[in-house]
Amino acid sequence: MAAITVRDLVKRFGDTTVLDGVSLEVPDGAFGVLVGPSGCGKSTLLRLLAGLEEPTAGRILFGERDVTDAEPRDRDIAMVFQSYALYPHLSVEKNLAFGLEIRKVDPDEIRDRVATVGDMLGLTTLLQRMPSELSGGQRQRVAMGRAIVRRPEVFMFDEPLSNLDAALRGQVRVDIRRLHSELQTTSVYVTHDQVEAMTLADVMFVMNEGKIEQAGAPLTIFNRPATRFVAGFLGSPPMSFIDAKIAHSSEGCVARIVAKEDELCLPLDPSVYREALADGQPVVLGLRPHEIRVVDSAAPLRARVLLSEKLGSETHVYASLAGTEITVRVDGELSLQEGQELGLDIEAAAIHLFDPETGKSWW
Amino acid sequence: MVIRSLWILFAVLLAGLTCSAHAEASVEADGRGRPITLWHAYRGAEQQALQNTLSAWKLRQVETLAVPYDAYAAKLAAAIKLGQGPDLFIDAHERLGNYRSRKLVAPVGDALSDPDAFLPQAMAAIRHGGQAYGVPLSQKCVALFFNPTWVKAPPLYLEGLNAALRQPLPTGSFLLAYENGNAYAHAALLHGFGGRFLDDHDGFAFLGPPAESSLIFARDLVTRGEVPENADGALVTTLFRSGKAAFAISGPWLAADLSAAKIPYGISVLPRLKATGQPLRPFLTIEAVMLTPRGAARSEVRALARYLGGRDAAKRRQKLARVDSARRDVVPDEKDHVLRAFRQQAAQAVVMPSSLAMQAVWEPARRALRQVLSARSDAGPALRQAQRRFADVRRPPPAPRSPTPWLLALGGLMLLASWRLYRRARDAEFREAVRRSMPAYAYVIHAVIAIGVLVVLPLLAGALIALYAGQPGEMYFVGAAHFLSLVTARGGDLLGSGSFYVVLFVTVLWTALNLVCHLAIGLSLGVLLARPVLRGRALYRVLLIIPWAVPSYVTALAWKGMFHRQFGAVTGLIHQLNRVFGTEMEPIAWFSRFSTALTANVATNVWLGFPFIMVVTMAALTAVPREVLDAATVDGATRWQRLRRVTLPMIRPTMLPAVLLGAIWTFNMFNVVFLVSGGEPDGQTDILVSEAYRWAFTRGAQYGYAAAYAVLIFFLLAGSTFFAARWRDRASSREAALAGGVS
C-alpha cells in the first residue's frame, strides 16, 4: 500500500494540453475520486497514473517511490475499465488468473486466490463461462475480481459503473465501498457521476479543463464550493445562479437583483459579508434548490412558476425570479400550476457568492 | 408472377436459339455462295504478305482470321468439330499427325497439281500413306549466325569455333549461344552424331551411343564455359544482339530481329562434327495450307490452296515477308545471303516427324537433357529414364469398359432418392413447407440457374472426363481405370518419380512452407503497420500491397529471371558480396537441386502471398479493443506476451478463413510452379495441378488422366476444408460469439 502523490503533471497531445500542471495527493489506504465533465482530463490522469501514457512533465510517486518512468507492470497496480476489457478468448477463471500467470505466481496459489476472490464476488458458479456468456453485471464483477486477485498496491477504476443500469449501479457502488473498507487498498476512481463521487470518495478532486478546481472531503466541497464551476457541477438539481450587485443599507448588506420589471433584495449573512465587498460590486449569487423554501405568496420574495417536474418524493420547480430562472426543490405533495406566484424564503447563510470575473467563491 | 416472367424469358431465349440455328442451316445449304474462310497464326510481315497474296485472288471473297499461335490447335479442333471451323488453314506440318488422327484435315486432292514443283523434303513432310495432306508454303529451320566483329569466317567444324575467332573473347562473353535445354535445339547435335528421337515405328530412339555422345558434347560445351547454361530464346537473342556471343544457333526470327535493329551479322549452314564427320542437321518445319474435310469438298477452296502454293504467291511471300519458299522454282535472290543460307540448311535438315508419338518425346527428352547439362546424372541413366517416361506417356490407354454397372448404380441411387422424395412428399407438413417457400425459390432461381450453368455443369463435365479415355472426339468409357492407375502409380514404383504420392507429398510440403512464411511475414507486417505511431504508415501499406496487385505471372517471370545462375540478380548480389567482403561464394544453380528450386518457388509465392495475410491481419486488428490490450499491460504483460496471449488469440477466428483460403490458393498455385521452376529439377518441384496440366497438354493430351488428377485435387481440398472447419468449430466453441464478449 502506498499514498499517491502527483506533482505538477502536464500532458500534451501535439498542441492540445490535456493536463495543465495537476498536483494531488491520495493518502495511503484512502479512496480518491477524480470527478469532472467529459474531456476534463480525468481519464488521462488515471492512464498516466497507471503508466499507460507518459507525462510531458511532472512526477508521480507511489509512497516514496518515483514511478514516473516505470512500466505499468512495475507499478503494482490493478485497473477496472469502463468496458471491463475482459479477455474474450479466456474463461472467467483464466481471466482472473491471467495477471498472476504473467507474474509467474505458483499455480497452487493462483488456484487459491482465484477461488477466494470468486467466493468474495459470487463468481464461483461462473468460473468456467466465457465472457460472452455473462450479463453486464457479471462481467463487471469479473473485472473487479481480476483487479482484486492481484492484491496490488493501488486500485484504479475508470468509470466502472457507467455501462450498468441504474439499479445495479447503486448496488455495485455499495459493493465497491464495502470491498474498499475490507481491503483498505489505496484507490483512484474516475467518474463523471457526482453521486458516485460523493458516496465513494474519502478525498475528492473536481477537475475542469485539465486542472483540479478543488480537492478535499466530498461534503466540504459540496458545502463550500471554491468556484462557480464546482458549485454548479455538484448537487442535483444543480445550483441556480443569479447576477446581482452588492448594496449596503441600514439593515446590513444586501444583494440587489436588478431586473427589468423588478428589483429584489436578498439579505446576506453577516458571517459571509466582507467589508471588501464594495457598494455596487457585481456578484453571482448561488442558490441550492433544496435551500429555498416556499412560503405563502405574500412573502416579499416572489417568483413565477414556469414548469414543475414531479418525481414522487419531491418536485423540482423551475421558476422565474426577477427574470432569472431558478430551481426550487419542494415536497412531492405540493401541487403547483404554471404561472402561479410563489413566495420564497432564502436564508442568508445558504447564499453562495461568486466573483463574476474569475468564478471564485467569495468565502 | 416471377415464375411466369421467367417462363416468358425462357421461351424468348428458346425462340431466339431456334431462329439462329435455322438461319445457319440455310447458309449451310447454300454452301457454294459462302465466302471462303482461312485461318492462320501469322503476325507482322507474314500476315501482310498473306493479305497481299489474297488480294490478288479474285475468284471468291476470302475471310481470314488470325488466331494467336498458343491457342491455335485447340481452337481449330473445337471449331471444326462444331462445324464452325475454316475451310482451309495454315499450320506447321508436324501437327498433321494430330490433325489426321482427329479427322480435322482431308487429303488436298487437286490442290496439289504439280508435286514435282516442290522441294523433296517439303513433299516428304506433308505426305502420309501416299496421300498429300497439305500444300507446302515455306520451310523453317535453324542455322548458324555469327558476329563479324569477332568471327573471320564461319568454320567448317563445330569443334573449330574457337579457331575462327579474330581474337580471344573477353570474359563474360560466350563462344556460342543456343537453347541448349531445349530438345528441339538439341536435335541438330543429335542428328550430327547419327542419332534420332523416334524410330520408324514410333519407338523411342533417343538412346544408345549417338544420343549419349550428343548429350556429353552439349554438357562439355557448358562445362568449358563456351555456351551459357539454361539459355532460352530471349537470352540467346539478347546475348547475340549485345555482342556477348560470337555464334548463335537460331532461326529466321533472330534474322528478322537483327535486321530490324540494323545489327550486322553473318549466317551460314551449321558446321560439321569432327567426331563423326557429319553435319549438324536441325529439325525442319514445313508450313503448309491444310484443308478441312468441309473445305476439301469445295473446288474453289482447293483452287485457293493451289493458288497459295503456286509460284506467283510464293514470290510475293519471299519478297514481302522474306521467308524461304518450299518451291523448287522460287529461289532466293543471289544477294540475299540469309535466305540462301536457310535454303542450303533446309536441304540438309531432318524433317520433323509428324506422328503423335513425337509429342510424347519432347518432355522426357528435355528432362534428360537438363539432367545431363546440370551434371545431375550421366547420359546413359538419364536417357533410360527418358525412355521409361516416354513409355509411361505412350502406355496403352485403358480398355473400354461397359458403363452398364455405373449406370445401374446411378439409376439405383436416383431411384432411392426419388423414393425418399416421394415419401417426404406424402407428408402434408412437408408439402405445406414447400408451398410456403415457393416465393423464396422464385427469388433465388436465377442465381441457381446461373451457378448451375456456369459452375456446376462445367465441374461435372470436367469430372466426367475422368471416366473416359481417348482423344477428344473419340472418347470412350473406362470407368475408374484412371483413378486405379493413378493410385497405383501406373504400375510403377509408388514412391518413384512422377508418382501421385510423391507429387502429393511435394504439394503438401509446398503448401505448408508457404503458409508458414505467409503467416510469419504477413502477421508481423500487419501488426507493425497497424501501430498508430508508425510514421509514413499509409505509404508502407501501399508499397507492401503492390506485390499483390501485380499480375502473378509477371512477378513469377521476374523472380525466375532473378534466380538465373549466370545472369540473375541473386548471382549479381553474390558477386557484389564477394567483392565487398572478399568472400568466395559460388553462384547458386537454383533449379538444379530440389531444395533450392523449391526455395525459389516458395520465395516467389511468399512475395505474392504475404500482402493478403497482412491486409487481413490489419483488418482483424481493428477488432481488438485498446482497453483489452491496456488491461493486459496493467496485468503486467510485456509487448510480446500481449501479442501472443491476447492479440493473436483474439484475431484467430478472423484469420482462420483467410489462412484456409490462402492454403487452397497455394495448393493450386499453378503460375508460380509452372513459370519459376517449371518443375525443375526433373519434375521434382511439380505440384498436383502442374502435373495434371502436363498430362493434359504436354503428354499426348491424356485429358481423362488429367481430369482424374483434378477430381482427386478437388476431393483432397474439399476434404481438408471440411476437416479444418470441423476443427475450427471445436476449437472455437469455447470462444463462441467473440464479438459479444468484447462489447
Image (cartoon, coloured by chain):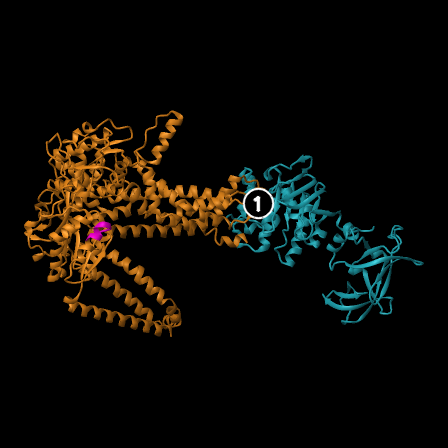
Subunit of label 1 = B
Identify the residue at horizontal 61%, vertical 51% (top origin).
Answer: A82
Q: Is residue B47 magenta?
A: yes
Q: Position of residue A36 (x, y in %)?
A: 69, 51
B497 and A59: which is toward the camera: A59
The residue tagged 1 is B630
Query: Looking at the image, is B320 positioned above or below residue B421?
Result: above
- Which amino acid type is shown beneath numbered disc 1? Asp
Residue drawn where x is 24% and y is 57% of the image: B464
Q: Where is residue B611? Give x, y as percent.
A: 42, 46
Local crowd size for mark 1, using a 10 Å CA cut-off: few (<14), some (14–19), many (≥20) = many
Q: In the structure shown, which secondary structural element does the residue marked by tag 1 occupy?
A: helix
Which of the 4 quarters of the picture holds residue B213? top left
- What number of labels is visible? 1
Residue B570 seen in the current view: yes
Image quarter where the N terminus of chain B lies is: bottom left
Q: Which chain is orange?
A: B
Residue at the spot x=37%, y=25% of the render? B583
Chain A, which colour?
cyan
Magenta-tinted stretch? B41-49
Q: Main secondary structure of the magenta part?
A: helix
Q: Position of residue B720 (x, y in %)?
A: 34, 50
Where residue B146 appears, as percent x and y from the top left, is 21, 35
Q: Residue at x 28, y 67 (%)?
A: B418
